[in-house]
Image (tube, rainbow, N blue to C red):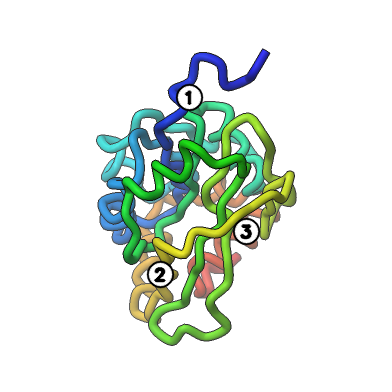
Amino acid sequence: MDKLQGRNRKIITGCLILGNDKRWVEECILNHKKFFDKLIIFDGSIDGSIDIVRKYANKVIPQGDMEIDFSAFKNKCLEECDTEWAWFFHCAERLSLGEPDVIRAVLSITTANAYKLARVNEPNGADYPDYQTNIVRVGRGKYIRKLHEIYIPQTEQIFKEPVIRHLIRPKEELKLRDKRWMEIDPETQRRHLSRPEIKQRIKDEYGGNNGI
């Protein structure tokens, strides 16, 4: 039986992988939401980010005890999608250009399993554009690799628009994120840092010295 039987084949679920992004997350969702009909949030935050945007979500999936594995996070979202397409994004991304009706029209007739979008770094644009597999057909493939995940089978095509603007946080913002982390109660910090891979994630994400 077709795994997509009973799904609405003409709508898209946005899938946000959420970290500690209180300042960025609502602006990100408001920027993206015209392209989606539903929203799933995979919540790995501990700073209250989810409380700001829970109202936009059709479903929230808590990370819980799952180890840091971005393919597993995305595959979990795919399991929960009841649409034909899923569109993955994160809080440092903004979309420029692009017409939702055009995207929907293409997705309603294509035989492709996935689409890539161009991504450019802002403000400097260094080493870009590159192309990210953000839009995938539900039930036809999966993500692999814990970091720098890829989607298989790799039968992607490319949308020229919209373009992903990948925002580079200024040092002041990184310092603010570091300060917010230090304000979280010590017991919550200890629980969150119970695994080595989470320690590494915090170092990478905050860009500061958190004593870990």
Q: Quadrant of the N terminus?
A: top right
Check the image and report above or below for 13 versus 28: above
Disc nearer the start of the sequence (2/3): 2
Residue where numbered disc 2 is placed: 165
Query: In terms of secondary structure, where does tag 1 sit?
Result: loop
Query: Residue 133: x percent and y percent?
Result: 58, 55
Query: Which mark identifies residue 110?
Result: none
Q: Residue at x 58, y 72 (%)?
A: 130
Query: Residue 155: x percent and y percent?
Result: 69, 49
**Residue 79 lies in what quarter of the image?**
top right
Query: In terms of secondary structure, where does tag 3 sit?
Result: helix
Residue where numbered disc 1 is placed: 82
Q: Quadrant of the C terminus?
A: bottom right
The three-letter code of the residue at mark 2 reads Arg
Query: In terms of secondary structure, where does tag 2 sit?
Result: strand
Q: Nearer the viewer, mark 3 or mark 1?
A: 1
Label 1, residues with CA under 10 Å away: few <14, some 14-19, many ≥20: many
The three-letter code of the residue at mark 3 reads Lys
Q: Is residue 141 left or right of residue 18?
A: right
Q: Residue furthest front?
A: 109
Disc nearer the start of the sequence (2/1): 1
